[in-house]
Amino acid sequence: MTAIPQPVFSEPWHAQVFALTVHLNEAGYFDWPDWATRFGATLKAHGLTKELDGGDDYFVAWLETLEHFLASMGMTDITEIAQIRQAWEEAYLATPHGAPVNLQD
Amino acid sequence: MPHDHPDHPHSLLPPDPALRIKALETILTRKGLVDPAALDAIIDTYENRIGPRNGAHVVARAWRDPAFKAALLEDATAVVSDLGYYGRQGEHMVAVENTDKVHNIVVCTLCSCYPWPLLGIPPGWYKSDAYRARVVREPRAVLSDFGVTLPPDVAVRVWDSTAEVRYLVIPQRPPGTDGMDEAALMDLVTRDSMIGTGLAVAP
């Protein structure tokens, strides 16, 4: 136990994947128990090969669950995710340091 | 991957999962399924507005008001909802009280179900395999790691959260706190004391 305040989310993307999931649940795209069942299964699978420390590895499992869940509902697919992810990577590499990074439509 | 572009220093490339979540946001926003402002609002809420102070408010009030405590133990969902601490995932809240005979401790063995409206986002250790597996098997050893040693005649009860049911531990009120007001009592109620891995601190 510590008196030093710790950030709620240790990485911005942890907050982003959390918020996106909560938002989609609140918008009615899926029930929370259904989400928890799928997430629990991913954690269990990842935990077979290494002991998860509840940090980055936890949110990596969260993200993987969300990607597959959205794909199973037809809201996106793995190819589309890979394409847009690549587009973001190229946008970062093409944007001068300090400038806002935007995706070309 | 660190590398040099002395002529054209570009933006720092975020890690792979950060790019993947950006991709999901872009895809769903373009399809009109997601409102980016709503995502920012959710992050702001959990980073700045919801946290263990909410739970501490409930506990301090329960310590001071026996009727409130009775209602809380009877139907925590209704009582905390009245205070504005309602679960947006539709979960049921249950309050469990520590006494001289029983110490309660909360875990989620499936994933990391946690009473967000009362405690905010769980700490890393709550989400770790080590805690989730061990606390069921050897709760006293886990408590000892947290610096909590209970008398042998105190029973330890472990509550396994689910997506539908989340638990709040009402820690024992420390001695020497008679007459303290709600705000002062709230300062004694730590996050860990409401998970059961700690005790309320003495004034």
Image (cartoon, coloured by chain):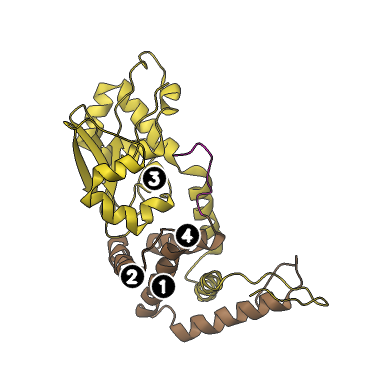
Chain colours: A brown, B yellow
Disc 4 versus disc 1: nearer the observer: 1
Labels 2, 3: front one: 2
The reply to whether dot 4 and dot 1 touch (C-beta < 8 Å) is no
Q: Are marks 2 and 1 in contact (CB under 8 Å)?
A: yes
Count of marks overlaid on the render? 4
Q: Which residues are magenta?
A: A1-9
Mark 4 belongs to which amino acid? Ala
Check residue B71 in the rendering and tell me which mark sits there, or answer none.
none
Instruction: Assess disc 3: are there few (<14), some (14-19) or many (≥20) residues with their C-alpha within 10 Å of its C-alpha.
Output: many
Q: Are marks 2 and 3 in contact (CB under 8 Å)?
A: no
Dot 4: what SS?
Answer: helix
**Mark seen at residue A19:** 4
- Which quarter of the figure has residue B69? top left
Residue, disc 3: B117
For the residue marked with disc 3, what is the amino acid?
Pro
**Distance between mark 2 and mark 4 Cα atoms:** 19 Å
Mark sitting earlier along the chain (2/1): 2
Q: Which residue is mark 2?
A: A42
- Residue occupying image coordinates x 53% and y 55%: A10
Residue B177 x/y as whole percent: 37, 17
Do marks 4 and 1 share a subunit?
A: yes
Tell me which chain the residue with mark 1 is part of. A
Q: Nearer the viewer, mark 1 or mark 3?
A: 1
Check residue B131 for magenta coloring: no
